[in-house]
Image (cartoon, rainbow, N blue to C red):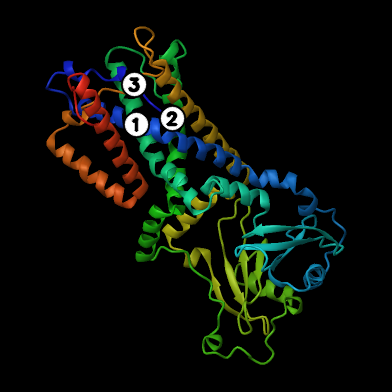
Amino acid sequence: MTLSDDTVEPLSTTPPTLSVRRRWRPFAVRLHFYAGVLVAPFLLVAAVTGGLYALAPSLERVVYRDILSVEAQGPALPLGEQVERARAVHPDLAVTTVRPAAAPDDTTRVSFHDPTLEEDRSRTVFVDPGTGRIVGEQVTWLGYLPLSTWLDGLHRHLNLGEPGRVYSEIAASWLWVVALGGVCLWVGKAAADRRRGRNGRVFSVDRSGSGRSRTMNWHGATGIWLLAGLLFLSATGITWSAYAGAHVTEIRSAMNWQRPQLVTVSEQTHAGHHGAEGAVTDPAAFDYPGVLDAAARHGVRMPVEITAPAEPGEAVSVTEIDRAFRWTSNAAAVNPTDLSVTSSVDYWRDYSVIAKLADWGIRAHMGSLFGLLNQLALLAVAVGLVTVIVRGYRMWWQRRPTRGSNRAVGRPPVRGGIRQLPPVAVVAVGVTAVALGWFLPLLGWTLAGFVVIDVIMGRVKGRAVPEKGESL
């Protein structure tokens, strides 16, 4: 993701009375070059894995069609009976959650706590709601089937666990910097072309060009069209990251922007009265229609997930699960004994504006907010980003010397851009870099690494030829 150095005049011939815009350009070009060359591999992996993950819901409907869909067989059996059929498969395991079939041709999911699995995994049995037949079982993670689980892990941490999250955080932290920097350079180049009487295009490609010029046109124009999507993915991706995400969580907590939590433990349970007379704890004994009706009166609509109490005295929680074009995540805690609602979360009432925006952003990032349309949009952004990255590296290769040198790629843009900035601007750059480095630690660390590498390379070259500039 680079722009060629011929978009900036050599520093040695630039007059001292540069405009503010032209003073910034050499610095911006070199920063964009380094960020593009060194961070682009992380962005490329994130784009490919993210594009695959965006298609996971649609792929699962094909891969797991035998357990997700059945032929409608008339009225559904009582949900309690469906749960009993599932329990017969694993009589020694405790039921944790139930997802009733949302349509006659959907299956009911009954999940069990299996101590032989990882802590956050469940053994899920799929039941035909019309016949009670067991159509299969899978190990699930937070309701996600194995394919989505694997692709999610690949996108978040390359399935390497916590150490692998470094790659995705570097990608999310730098994506907005590279995107905004590239757009500024591209728009600035178009404006300069217009001042020279040329056709300065921004949103379209000049097909009359060839070679590096044509590649740059596609690189810049595509980046312009992708800008909103890239900024969105960067912002929402940062909220999930390990280091920057912790800062986001602290800010949301301090400003009371967190997601409201459903209270399922009653005051009596807090006081230690767990053995209340008549308490219902067996999931098969729940009055499921009564529980669902009680939750529906508080705005909780199908499809939902029913979570069994962890211990006597606790309520059954009923929570809306994601589906296309569902904006809410309402939830209710229902006493399974008398079917009273002990607590509820009303999305429009209890979520702050920021909490709503964060929730919608995360669901859109995952491709669930707008269904197939959402997934195709994410795939388009991912493919577009891959083409921008590939063309960026191609531009670097096209700038290689064609004679008199055996270099495989072009030289970096000229050094010393920061020297052209006014002292106040240099201080502003330093303060901004420190602030961003604190909030986005991996951006700060990698930026510091770029500067160190740049200084070392400059010093090494300075011993062979007279130094023409300083870092960045």
The residue shown at (34%, 21%) is 190
Q: Quadrant of residue 248?
A: bottom left
Find out whether the residues at labels 3 and 1 contact each other: C-beta distance under 8 Å: no
Q: Element at badge 1?
A: helix
Residue 170 position in % (x across, y down): 41, 44
Could you give the CA–CA distance between mark 3 and mark 1, rounded to whole angstroms?
22 Å
For residue 68, above or below residue 423: below
Count of labels shown? 3
Q: Quadrant of residue 177?
A: top left
Q: From this viewpoint, is residue 24 visible? A: yes
Q: Which residue is tagged 3?
A: 190
Q: Quadrant of residue 174?
A: top left
Q: Amino acid at mark 3?
A: Ala
Q: Element at badge 2?
A: helix
For residue 177, above or below residue 315: above
Pick the quarter of the image with the C terminus: top left
Could you give the CA–CA distance between mark 1 and mark 2, rounded to whole angstroms?
17 Å
For residue 267, above or below residue 190: below
Residue 32 position in % (x across, y down): 34, 31
Which of pointers 1 and 2 indicates the residue nearer the eye?
1
Could you give the CA–CA distance between mark 2 and mark 3, rounded to whole angstroms?
14 Å
Q: Amino acid at mark 2?
A: Gly
Q: Which residue is tagged 2?
A: 223
Of residues 437 and 15, the one nearer the viewer is: 437
Q: Is residue 56 left or right of residue 2?
A: right
Q: Which residue is tagged 1?
A: 34
Disc nearer the start of the sequence (3/1): 1
Q: Please tell me how crowded label 3 is: few (under 14), some (14-19), or many (20+) other residues with Cα within 10 Å.
A: some
Q: Is residue 184 left or right of residue 293?
A: left
